[in-house]
Image: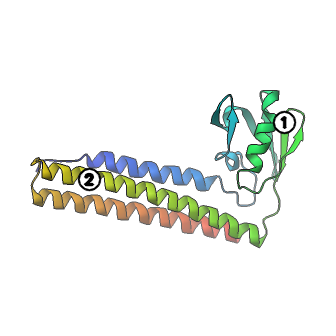
Amino acid sequence: MSDAIDLNDIKRRMDGAINAFKSDIASLRTGRASANILDPVTVEAYGARVPLNQVANITVPEPRMLSVSVWDKSMVGAVDRAIRESNLGLNPIVDGQSLRIPLPELNEERRKSLVKVAHDYAEKAKVAIRHVRRDGMDGLKKAEKDGVIGQDDSRSQSERVQKMTDDTISEIDRLLVEKEKEIMQV
């Protein structure tokens, strides 16, 4: 049987979507301060959008407080704006060249909005996985059309790609349910 597509590459790309999802949901806070909360924040700096950790140092001085020390004084306003617009519900307090970010107590409404954000992250990951599946299926169709593989081989490989897709999406769902429980029980 000749392999028309690289199943290892498809698996690697699907695993990449899972890892990106894990990183996204790790940034959702569940009551205790963590520097990861600010991972999804990007800042308009020097003509490009860059991750916050490339223009500032993020520390956790207290359990319910984050401190962001901006390296370039001219970037303080942009960092403040990026954090406020990040949909994380944080309101930084500018203190010279650093920002103090108190973490509000999680109320029921805020927990529900965090769950909603987690669902958005999950959907984004599922879309990425479906794109990988589509690329694999397109490669199989092209290989079959070009005569590289036969119809039976194409069908068996497409079933493997579909199984990988289903397994990866169920892993995303499992991680989402865990995060949902974590957010709602704190």
The x, y position of residue 31, in whole percent, is 75, 60
Please tell me which residue lies in front, 46 or 103.
46
The x, y position of residue 67, in whole percent, is 81, 41
Quadrant of res 126: bottom left
Q: Say left or right for 61 vs 167.
A: right
Q: Is residue 73 above or below residue 32?
A: above
Q: Is residue 144 above or below residue 112?
A: above
Mark pair 1, 2: CA separation: 50 Å
Q: Residue at x 59, y 52 (%)?
A: 24
The x, y position of residue 164, in whole percent, is 33, 59
Q: What is the number of the mark on residue 53?
A: none
Labels 1 & 2 near each other (Cβ < 8 A):
no
Report if residue 52 is visible in the image: no
Residue on which the image places disc 2: 138
Q: Residue at x 33, y 49 (%)?
A: 10
Q: Say left or right for 47 vs 23.
A: right
Q: Which amino acid, by three-letter code, is at mark 2?
A: Asp
Which quadrant, please, contains the C terminus?
A: bottom right
Q: Is residue 115 above or below residue 148?
A: below
Residue extending furthest toward the front = 47
**Residues packed near mark 2 inside 10 Å, few (<14), some (14 to 19) or many (20 plus):** some
Helix, strand or loop at mark 2? helix
The x, y position of residue 125, in whole percent, is 48, 56
Helix, strand or loop at mark 1? strand
Q: Is residue 39 above or below residue 105?
A: above
Residue extending furthest toward the right = 95
Please tell me which residue lies in front, 127 or 164.
127
Q: Which amino acid, by three-letter code, is at mark 1?
A: Ser
Residue on which the image places disc 1: 98
Q: Residue at x 65, y 45 (%)?
A: 39
Q: Residue at x 79, y 53 (%)?
A: 90
